[in-house]
Amino acid sequence: MGTFTNMTHRHPGPVVVAHSLGCLAFVHWASSSRLPIAGAMLVAVPDPRGTQFPREAKGFGPVPQQKLDSYSLVVMSSDDPYGEPQYVHRCASVWGSELVDNGAAGHINAARGHGEWHRGFELLRSLRSRPP
């Protein structure tokens, strides 16, 4: 999970960018924190009850089922083995997040050959420049 505060933006507070387990950690934090953030970009949300979820990763479920206080984007892949599309759609809906389908990209990460993920940077820029 990372925060980007040095990009030009119109919102007070940092933007949180999280990937995979970091997304689950973020929504747990957000469900109890009142610290303001400008927004969140959640990439490759996994299902802790899914068959591919690492059994050694404990404490991520149950996933909070409430609207996030700040604007958020959930970026998914239609063939992510850790997060079935129906599950990710449901999370985005419950959290009040905008859903971005990145197509058949597997588990969106460098191991899948995404390298410098230009689309991700574009999404982050659009999130940072979004009017309040």
Image (cartoon, rainbow, N blue to C red):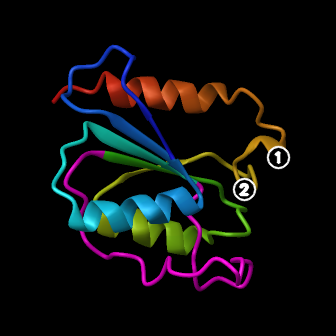
Residue at (71% x, 26% y) in the render: 116
Q: Position of residue 36 (x, y in %)?
A: 18, 44
Where is residue 38, by image quadrant?
top left
Q: Nearer the viewer, residue 25 or 82?
A: 25
For label 2, the crowd category at 10 Å Cα-Cα, with few meaning under 14, some 14 to 19 and many 20 or more, is: many
Horizontally, is 47 left or right of 55 in the view?
left
Tell me if residue 93 is in the magenta stretch. no
Tell me if residue 49 is in the magenta stretch. yes
Tag 2 near tag 1, CB within 8 Å: yes
Q: Nearer the viewer, residue 59 or 113?
A: 59
Amino acid type at mark 2: His
Quadrant of the frame with the C terminus: top left
Residue numbers of the magenta segment: 44-71
Where is residue 107, by image quadrant?
bottom right
Residue linked to disc 1? 112
Where is residue 34, by image quadrant?
bottom left
Q: Position of residue 51 (x, y in %)?
A: 72, 85
Q: Nearer the viewer, residue 35 or 114?
A: 35
Horizontally, is 59 left or right of 109 in the view?
left
- Element assignment for label 1: helix
Q: Is residue 105 above or below residue 15?
A: below
Q: Nearer the viewer, residue 55 or 126?
A: 55
Disc 2 from disc 1: Cα separation? 7 Å
Residue linked to disc 2? 107
Choose the circle earlier in sequence order: 2 or 1. Answer: 2
Horizontally, is 45 left or right of 125 in the view?
right
- Element assignment for label 2: loop
Amino acid type at mark 1: Arg
Residue at (31% x, 33% y) in the render: 14
